[in-house]
Amino acid sequence: MDTVLRSRSREVVIGPSHQFCIIGERINPTGRKIFQQQLRAGDLSRVEIDVDQQVAGGAMVLDINMGAPLADEADLMVRAVTLVQARTDLPLCLDSSIVEVLEAGLAAYEGKALVNSVTAEDERLAAILPLVRRHGAAVIGLPNDEEEIPEEPRRRLDLARKILDVATADYGIPAEDVIIDPLAMPVGADTTVVGKTLETIALLRSELGVNTTLGASNVSFGMPDRGSIGAAFLPMAIAAGLTSAIMDARSPQLVRSVRAADLLLDRDPWGAAWIAAHRAEQAEQAAQAAQAGQAAAR
């Protein structure tokens, strides 16, 4: 089952037979005080930097979250979507818990976006799924409801099935346009959580056949050397069936781990993407060394 996202001029396919989809997480003010201040002042200049860095790093889709406290999130979402579309042709993932913000962003977007996200709560399903259907978008479903964020993989599967059933039967959203987040929790709080996430991914793949995504940085939250943890976790999750992740596309360590997993799982025919990325990195290093040499000679 393939999920197709589109911008005005580019199409990205998420699916088990395709290369792993890197969704850049950086356009998000959470934990970024200066960025929050800029957004409250209506300054989107940092967004341009975040776009350029993530595109250069290998992002295939960009997540946009404008949830800065005391800011006009709907207006910022429209402005950010317009700005990002002018700067790159990558498809976008619109990220907000506020229905009006999502609606504003979808109305401004040219293409088929990914909506992040909807839970299994009846009220949230009724609020967000009609919006997804009306704009022809795809949606990320979180398998938690009014009662719990379940620990057990089978319970997560049950809630994911509810989201899928409601989306397809009640709102006519194609099954391939429902991507499920298996819920990645911080390993620093409980070292059993990663095993449960991997089991959930495998169940979602085998029993529902849906594509999956998660916030890769959640796993290493609160731990030292987060890059190494993420670089170990992502290939494990990909082998279990994960088909995309919202992650730091600026991190060469994380991006290389994903590309290596694609190569080893035969999703990179003849290693073409791996070799091309290696050659591009070598060329960049050579260019930087030449520039340094010229500067030293002045």
Image: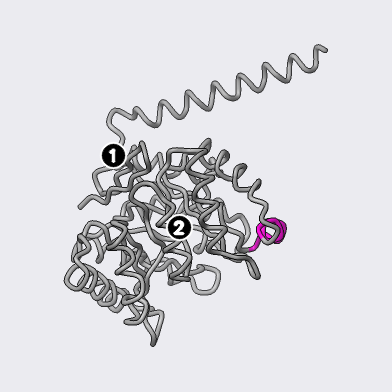
Q: How far apart are marks 1 and 2 (CA)?
A: 33 Å
Give the percent coordinates (x, y) of residue 7: 37, 43
User: In the image, is residue 35 part of the stretch drawn in magenta?
Assistant: yes
Q: Is mark 1 on a helix, strand or loop?
A: loop
The disc placed on residue 267 is: 1
Answer with the quarter of the image where residue 50 lies: top right
Q: Which residue is drawn at 37% across and 40% down?
A: 8
- Location of mark 2 (residue): 105
Q: What element carries label 2?
A: helix
Q: Residue at x 31, y 66 (%)?
A: 199
Residue 240 shows in this picture = no
Whichever of labels 1 and 2 marks the residue nearer the N terminus, that label is 2
Q: In this view, does 175 lie to the left or right of 245?
A: left
**Quarter of the picture holding the C terminus:** top right
Give the percent coordinates (x, y) of residue 97: 47, 70
Residue type at mark 1: give it.
Answer: Arg
